[in-house]
Image (cartoon, coloured by chain):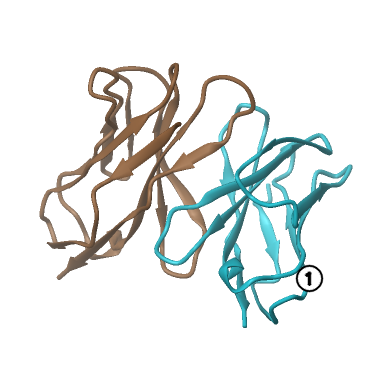
Chain colours: A cyan, B brown
Amino acid sequence: ETGVTQSPTHLIKTRGQQVTLRCSSQSGHNTVSWYQQALGQGPQFIFQYYREEENGRGNFPPRFSGLQFPNYSSELNVNALELDDSALYLCASSLAGGGYTFGSGTRLTVV
Amino acid sequence: GDSVTQMEGPVTLSEEAFLTINCTYTATGYPSLFWYVQYPGEGLQLLLKATKADDKGSNKGFEATYRKETTSFHLEKGSVQVSDSAVYFCAHRADSGYSTLTFGKGTMLLVSP
């Protein structure tokens, strides 16, 4: 049974650019959630996808968007990057209502 | 709104000392409660959980009891090890609607030999 895999592990982008982060969910999990963890803070909920539909969103602007694919993998897209978007982005997968399995995260630095 | 409050760190202990990390929450209904651990440079790992009042979650010597009357879920370990050094996050998940996790800010634990 594979866990949650995120790619890339690290990347550096320039302010104003766009970025796509990827997540492969754990086998059998149909729900994917994304979290942003700023340095020294707890993870903050961005949004969640269940069977390819967004079914929940936290307090993040529309330039944060996502997709879930038929194999339940997911992407997080961020447009018009700002310096404050620098953070660790965590993906978690689960069966609806079940426990969450987290990936190791993508460390995004915006310069 | 829903929130989780943890004691601020870092918590610095000597090996074999007793550990308590306080956690309180605000939530409607009967949320599930969790402790996650994050080692340097890594993602989150579930340490333990409790899904209803008076439940005790336990794992690797860590314990936490779901206290609804005090809305608390304090993490304890009787004898810490150097390898327990990490950041610990308390979290809850609502019992209705789409279920996501609300995290506290985390508490860093540093254990010295």
Residue located at (24% from left, 54% from top) = B8
Query: From what the image shows, is residue A41 above or below residue A98?
Result: below
For the N terminus of chain B, give its image quadrant: top left
Relative image position of residue A77 (x, y in whole percent): 77, 60
Q: Which chain does the numbered disc 1 sit on?
A: A
Residue located at (29% from left, 19% from top) = B68
Left or right: A76 as drawn, with respect to A99: right
Q: Please rate how many residues cluster around mark 1, counting C-alpha atoms within 10 Å: few if below 14, some from 14 to 19, many from 20.
A: some
For the C terminus of chain B, give its image quadrant: bottom left
Relative image position of residue A89 (x, y in whole percent): 60, 60
Would you identify the image quadrant in which residue A7 lies?
bottom right
How many numbered circles are shown? 1
Relative image position of residue A79 (x, y in whole percent): 77, 65
* Amino acid type assigned to the residue bearing label 1 in the image: Gln
Residue under label 1, please give it: A18
Q: Is residue B23 visible?
A: yes
The residue at the far right in this view is A70
Query: From what the image shows, is residue B82 above or below residue B96?
Result: below
Left or right: A3 as drawn, with respect to A68: left
Q: What element carries label 1?
A: loop
Relative image position of residue B74 (x, y in whole percent): 24, 37
Residue located at (45% from left, 67% from top) = A39
Query: From what the image shows, is residue A84 above or below residue A27?
Result: below
Left or right: B108 as drawn, with respect to A109: left
> B113 or A52: which is nearer to us?
A52
Left or right: A109 as drawn, with respect to A38: right
Q: Can residue A32 be seen in this view?
A: no
